Amino acid sequence: MRIANLDGRAVLIQKGLAVDINTASEGRFGPDPRSIFENWDAFRGWAAGRTLGPGKPFDEGALQAPVPDPRQVFAIGLNYADHADEAKLGHPENLVVFTKFASALAGPNVTVELPSESVDYETELVVVIGHKLHKGDEAESRAAIAGYAVGQDYSERHVQTRGPAPQFSLGKSFPNFAPFGPAVVTLDELATPDALSISAVLEGPSAAAHGGRWTVQDGTTADMIFPVSRIISDLSAVVTLFPGDLIFTGTPAGVGMARGIYLRPGDTLTSTIEGLGSISNRLVRA
Ligand code: ZN
């Protein structure tokens, strides 16, 4: 299943058309997008294998954040060895955890204003939680996954690294710094959910020396130091996870800081994960 948010209403994307879940279920599920994940097992049982309709054509640009109002947003740092290496930091023995404050959440294809000349990109698999969970083992953690989406962890590096202590959460929470989507994709749609290619392509001024199109990140989620079920299990050892919560799971190598570049007005960044789709953001001057 592919579950998205169109005009503030939960929809299923089937064959490129959007089916309004509340209408199709005669009011049993939705329309609030987060409520789908609050009732995840019942919804999945109702929707699985069912052909719903009628669907309607829609504009990808109109899609909003698949979960616009999660209770919690977690983000994991340094979760790919090649990215930890390029950041000249060690491979973590424990999760490196911060948040992206909820006001930064946005639909998949928003325009992002650059608050400075130090804004970087990090392409990430986003996990959407479907079960309340505290102290979950790895099997319970796996079962708590509702689905995956594509996310960008935009990061203002100056605020992120200024003293006296690093401010990861603040530097990564300017408006629209957490776009994700286009939909939440359930794992049964994916042939290899633990090994998905993950990439980012820059177009515009930053890519001028590369023929106007530059693949800046090209990795696989198989290279995560902490795989998804381990992240959920380790988080839940401390906190309670709720349905609709989001986890940004870290980025592979190729971020701008390591390349000596930052995003420039006029750039477009397209982030893609195998089987999940793409999100695309235009970067403009604030
Ligand atoms: Zn990140």
Image: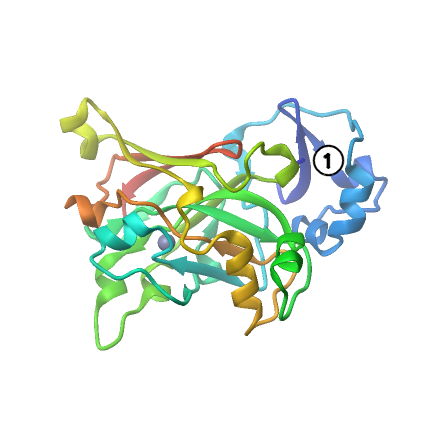
Displayed quadrant of residue 284: top left
Q: Position of residue 161 (x, y in %)?
A: 23, 65
Q: Position of residue 19 (x, y in %)?
A: 71, 31
Tell me the residue at 68%/24% (across/down): 56
- Kind of residue sitting beneath label 1: Asp
Q: Which residue is mark 1?
A: 20
Tell me the residue at 68%/37% (across/down): 11
Q: Position of residue 147 (x, y in %)?
A: 61, 45
- The quadrant in which the N terminus is found is top right
Image quadrant, ligand 1: bottom left
Viewer-side residue, 86 vs 5: 86
Viewer-side residue, 273 vs 66: 273
91 left or right, relative to 131: left
Tell me the residue at 24%/30% (across/down): 204
Displayed quadrant of residue 44: top right
Residue 46 visible in the snapshot: yes
Residue 6 visible in the snapshot: no
Q: Position of residue 178 (x, y in %)?
A: 43, 51
65 left or right, relative to 205: right
262 left or right, relative to 46: left
Q: Secondary structure at mark 1?
A: strand
Tell me the residue at 69%/58% (across/down): 131
Label 1 neighbour load within 10 Å: few <14, some 14-19, many 20+: many
Q: Residue furthest bottom?
A: 164
Displayed quadrant of residue 97: bottom left
